[in-house]
Amino acid sequence: MRVTAKRLTAEAFAPFGQVISTRVPSVGRRAHVAALENRRTTATPNLAVSRLSPVPLPIRAMALERHPFSSQTFVPTDLARYVVAVCPADADGEPLVERLLAFVADATQGVNYAPGTWHHPMTVLDRPGEYVMLRWDDGGAADTEWRHLNEPILIDVPE
């Protein structure tokens, strides 16, 4: 299977969560820019800072992950572009891989995945990149569920 990434927009991403604009139009702040959720009383916030190197194109998606009880937020701190790949779940909660969508986000866009959203791990483009991630974890197996794909999904990224 092969998909072509499109430009990330709030409307296209809405079934999976929210796009967060990192730009504030004037001095001040915008509050409540994402629906942060924690569905377990035993989980605590996990705020992480990560740095990744870009991968060769096309991207070879070999696995998908989800966080059934927590939203997961990514906010870029120093990167160029990155790929967001998501798909809905079937009635049993398994990823509908054939409906995978891929988007290209830029440095002014963060994303917040709704709990249970199947997605490909963060993938940066163009140059090494850094970002902040927020998720609620309790250290158990339900923090992150993985599904390894039988065949890779190739994700093409337009220039």
Image: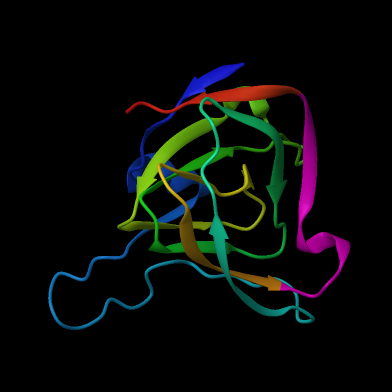
Quarter of the image where one finds residue 12: top left
Count of marks placed on residues: 0
Residue 96 appears left or right of 141 = left
Which coloring applies here?
Answer: rainbow
Percent across and percent down for residue 57 are 51, 27
Quick one: quadrant of the N terminus? top right
Residue 134 appears left or right of 140 = left
Percent across and percent down for residue 83 are 47, 41
Q: At 39% across and 62% down in the image, what residue appears?
A: 78
Instruction: Please say whether residue 138 is one of the residues in the magenta stretch.
Output: yes
Q: At 52% across and 25% down in the image, what residue appears?
A: 58
Whether 89 is drawn above or below 46: the answer is: above
Instruction: Please say whether residue 141 is one of the residues in the magenta stretch.
Output: yes
Percent across and percent down for residue 113 are 54, 55
Stretch in magenta = 137-150
Whether 129 is drawn above or below 6: the answer is: below
Percent across and percent down for residue 11 are 34, 43
Whether 104 is drawn above or below 66: the answer is: above
Whether 71 is drawn above or below 12: the answer is: below
Residue 53 appears left or right of 27 = right
Q: At 69% across and 24% down in the image, what residue appears?
A: 152
Residue in the foreground of this view, choosing between 41 and 51: 51
